[in-house]
Amino acid sequence: MDKILLGCIADDFTGGTDLANNLVRSGMRTVQTVGVPKNFELSGVDAVVVALKSRTIEPKDAISQSLEALKWLKSQGAKQIYFKYCSTFDSTAKGNIGPVTEALMKELGTDFTVVTPAFPDNGRTIFKGHLFVGDLLLSDSSMRHHPLTPMTESNLVKVMQSQYPGKVGLIDYKVIQKGESAISSKVQALKEDGVSAAVVDSLSNEDLMVLGRAVKDLALVTAGSGLAIGLAQNFGLEPNESTIKLPSVVGFKAILSGSCSEMTLKQVNHFQKLGFPCFQIDPIKLSTNSDHIDEAIKWARDQFSSSSGPILIYSTSNPQQVASIQNKLSVQVAGEMVENAMAQLAKELVTLGVGQLLVAGGETSGKCVQSLNISHLQIGPQIDPGVPWCYAYTKHVEGSVTRGEPLVGLHVALKSGNFGSEDFFSSAWKLIEN
Ligand code: ADP
């Protein structure tokens, strides 16, 4: 068995793909697994991202799943562990960033880690501990309306402190600008002050490269996907420009969107305006009409009788519509109902002959990947920052997904809500054309 260098635990699937994408582009051969692998032989791999779906589950469950992932990654030889969360620090009042960080630190026997969701390529920067999304503070951004993890506080020291039992500190941009030795001195000073987790300012990729070198000896780093660009250098690896080639594409093209994020709303509108076929899933109908999913499948079958797509099936709605649906059904029931519908649709679409599937929404993607029985993903070309095309392998048949006859592979792209350009749904396909 080859030993891996970096072991990563991602709290959702799209986040895992986002991280794997940055690792691949920085020169690390990376595989993303769906959940903790069983009987998995690795060879020629520098980093593994174990993608969980632990962002919004009960903290105790998130902890036990993360510890199980940690155990497996250690058994594969991982020299450093990377706990990956969202670049907008998506968490509930209870966690799970703080509780999982604490549990991983305890298990690794380490007394200090960094906390930095910065991802400058996607406009996520941290200044004096405050997270910015583009030009807006996190709390002024559309994240304040997120259906599951509304983020109303931009000061990450406060957010982390509210869910982490140890003392949280800050390494600000002035220290980062002075370089690695200044960061090391600051870490020492913070530790002497009893701080065990420090939010780190980062305004640019250069900052993340400096921080990457400074965290070389930490057993655990916690971050968005941004810090990944600074870690390959610690293992003597360099960006490898050669194209990350995936197998040839086959089958119809489809998009499932269960994301209600601002950018997804724009992407759905843009796709509709271009005249592509779209079908809206209505959560209220899902709760009252058992045929609603069948209607969507029948519609998709009709579309594919005359075109290979792309087609879109979406539940994406604006904040007012989401609030009204959540009032009627509750946040949890609406969320689960739509996620389950999307998961069923993913399976049905693949059975209809879809070979290129784009899924919008982190939680939504997690459910779809589970229902498709995908075990791991090979990371391919990047569509937009944070979103690569991937080639999916299933649990049962190595290298293939059951899609009618014969057995062939599936290309998937999993998009976090606010990622991707406005024309993402219509333009993503170009990159994987044969
Ligand atoms: P994002 O990546 O944009 O955060 P997610 O898929 O992670 O997207 O989260 C969106 C959540 O909103 C999911 O639980 C999804 O089922 C739920 N949802 C989707 N559409 C609706 C809707 N119309 N009304 C209420 N909840 C919805």
Image (tube, rainbow, N blue to C red):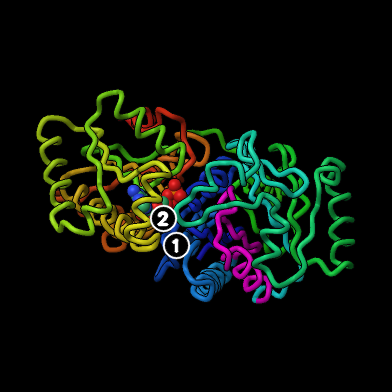
Q: Residue furthest top?
A: 274
Q: Nearer the viewer, mark 2 or mark 1?
A: 2
Looking at the image, which is closer to me, 254 or 50? 254
- Rendering coords of residue 107 (x, y %): 64, 76
The label shown at residue 21 is none
Q: Quadrant of residue 53?
A: bottom left
The label shown at residue 363 is 2
Question: Mark 1, residues whose alpha carbon is within 10 Å: few (<14), some, or many (≥20)?
Answer: many
The label shown at residue 53 is 1
Looking at the image, which is closer to me, 257 or 262? 262
Question: Mark 2, residues whose alpha carbon is within 10 Å: few (<14), some, or many (≥20)?
Answer: many
- Rendering coords of residue 411 (x, y %): 32, 43
Question: Where the C terminus falls, by quadrant?
Answer: top left
* Residue 364 in view (yes/no): no
Give the residue type at disc 2. Answer: Glu
- Rendering coords of residue 17 (x, y %): 47, 49
Q: Relative to 274, is 227 on the left or the right?
A: right
* Residue 211 in view (yes/no): yes
Which residue is rendered at x = 85% and y = 55% of the image? 184
Q: CA distance from mark 2 to mark 1?
A: 7 Å
Q: Are marks 2 and 1 in contact (CB under 8 Å)?
A: yes
Q: Quadrant of residue 314?
A: top left
Q: Which residues are magenta?
A: 78-106
Confirm or reject: label 2 Cβ below 8 Å from ligand 1: yes
Tell me the element at label 1. Answer: loop
